[in-house]
Structure formats: C-alpha cells, structure tokens
Amino acid sequence: MTAFVLRRLLQGVVTLWVVASLTFVLVRLTPGGPFDGAKPLPDAVRAHLGRSFGLAEAVPSPVAGTLDHFQVHVGQSVSQGTVLARLRLSDGSESLVRAPRDLTIVQLVGQPGRVLRAGDVLLVRETSWLQQYLTTLTSWASGDLGVTYASEGSRTVVEQLGDAAPVSLELALLALGLALLVGVPLGAWTALRPRSWLDHVTTAAALAVVSMSTLVLAPVLLVVFGVWLQWLPWGGWEPFAFSWEHLQPKILPVATLALVYAAWFARLTRAGLLDVLGEPWVRAARARGLTERQVVLRHALRGALVPVVAFLGPAVAGLAAGSVVVERVFAVPGMGDVFVTAALNRDLPLVLGAVLLYAAGLILANLAVDVACAALDPRLRRAP
C-alpha cells in the first residue's frame, strides 16, 4: 500500500506542474492585461506596476555619458542587437546602446541631454514569458504565490484564498455529505425492491435530476424557494456556523450541489447492489442462515459501494466546478466567487493561485479515493 500511495503522490506532483504550466500559458495568451482600463495609465505608472509584479524590469546604461536621443518608442518590440539609444561620451565620441535580447519597450526613463552614470536606468522593458514562468515556479516552490493586483500589492494571494477556501470547503463537504446520506440509502432501498413502483419513480426522478446541471438548478431553486415562496434566504454565509439563523442561508446552495450527486449515488448504489446480490458468495451467505439484513449490511453493501467510492473523485471535481456557479448565484464568498472576480479583473497571481489550490485539492481527493478503493478491493493496488 505504501508504494501505491507514493506512486499516486508522484503522479499528483507531475499533474500539478502540468496544470500550473498550462494555466500560466493560457492566462498570458488571453487578450488584455491587468492594468488595462477605460483610461490608459501613464507610462511611468505602468512601468512601476510592471516592475512591482515582475512583469517588467529596468535596462541600465552600460556606460557613463550624456543621452543624445532614443531610437525606439514606448510599445515597440525590437530584436536583439537593435540600437536603443545614442550616448555621447566625455571624450566626444558616440556610443550605441543595443538591445541585449528581444524586448518590448514599456517606458523611456532617460531624457535627451541627461548625464547618465554606468548602471543608471535607461528604459524599462517587459520581461519574457520564460523569465516570468521560471520566477513564478520558483516562488511557488517556496510557498509564495505573490500579491493580488486588485489590492495593489497590499494583500497576498495566500491571504485572499485563506479567507475564501474554508467557505468552499464547507460548502463541498456539506453537499457531498448530504448527497451520500440521501443517495446511498435510497439506492440500496430501491435495489432491494427491483421493478416496484418505488424503483420506477426513484429511477425516473434520478434520471431527471442527473440530466440537469447547477446552471439550471441554482436559479430555479433561488426563484422558487427564495423569491416566490420566500421560505429561505440567500447570502450571509458564515463559515462553520451551525445555528438555525446561520444554517438557513446555506440550505439552498448545499441542496443545489447535493441534488445532482445524490441522484448519481442512488443510481450507482442500486446498480452495484443488484450486481453483487447475484454473486455466488452472497447466495452462500444466505444458505448459512444469515438474515437478509445481515447479508446486505455485512457482505453485499461493501462490494456494492466500490463504484460509489470510485465516483467520489469525479464528484469532488464536479462539486468544485459547480460551486463556481452556486457561489455566484447565492452570493457565497468562496473560491468560485474569488476565481470569477479575479478572472474578470485579470488578477493573474490570484487566478493562478486559485487554479493551483483547486488542482491540489482535486489531486488529494482522488488520492484518497484511490486509497479507499484499494482498501475495498486489494486487486486495485497493482494498477499502474
């Protein structure tokens, strides 16, 4: 079992790196930038923000001299070796400052006629994707996810996610617990009464709910129970507060996420239990004089729950994706709300941090599912 867990952990680390790298590239390919707005920022402000967040860096003057003039302009992309500026040296000769590599100009710092010392800032350029990627990976490896653009550097990504993650975790745990509490007993009950009216009604209802998504369920439940009937409030989520006053705003978002997966768990439990009840070892248990209750609870249900446990991984992924919609609809201040807001604001460090946290959570959840399945069925421990 130890080798099995270590192998899964190694696969999880590789998966996390791939997800982080793809997210980095996709974010950089998205049109627009974090400092774009209705009113263009001055070059000096944009350069300062870029240097603060690792998106730009200064290009120093290689020698001392008087700046004659620039041969480039802001926003221009130049290749390595292109002449950036001309300097007049103290002996009256001229020196050409060339681009050390391909770069894009963000700000021209020096003014013509200004005396520069060697090492003084001549201009500010954008950093390359590779440089940003390597810097980002290094900071992630040290546990530093950077600062959020929206807070102008006053709030770290870890602090922002630390406030939102407990809310999403509570929402997912409550929804998953409710789905299991409803789905597994209902599936077992219908499996013990196949082709009865209860079986037909439950199967039809489960199929109808599975065919829907949180995009449909969330607005419908909100309009029916929150607006028309006014039975339940929404908004005002307090993490891990379970008084009736604090539970009421949690009922609709938890029920929205739980309904779909309760239907899945019911269908999987029913199919698994029907399959196991026909096995020879179950008939042998009945032949030994065990009651039907003992046969089901002690023997059959364990084997029937293997597909249910295996589905927990995709269920956790679905809960994470569905929580983005649910949190926006019901004003839940969780990870989904933070992620959508960060994406709309082009807050790149916060987007990357949220994706990393989601990916790490899903990897750990799938690892727990794999371990649980291996405990129920030892043959799975030899799986690659």
Image (cartoon, rainbow, N blue to C red):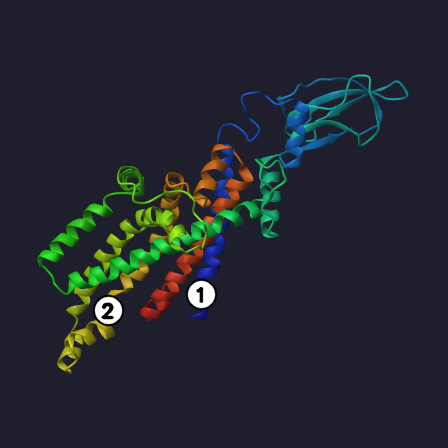
For the C terminus, the image quarter is bottom left
Q: Does residue 384 show up?
A: no
Distance between the alpha carbons at the discs numbered 1 and 2: 25 Å
Neighbourhood count class around disc 2 (C-alpha, 10 Å): few under 14, some 14–19, many 20 upward: some
Residue 381 lies in quadrant: bottom left
Label disc, if present, on residue 301 of the rendered structure: 2
**Which quadrant of the view contains residue 83?**
top right
Secondary structure type for disc 1? helix
Q: Is residue 99 above or below residue 174?
A: above
Q: Please state the horizontal and vertical placement of residue 347, each as a whole percent of the image.
A: 54, 36
What residue is rendered at 42% in x and 54% in y? Answer: 170
Mark in front: 1 vs 2 = 2
Residue positioned 9% across, 56% down in the render? 197
Amino acid identity at mark 1: Val
Give coordinates of residue 327: x percent, y percent. Answer: 40, 43
Residue 189, position as x, y percentages in the image: 18, 63
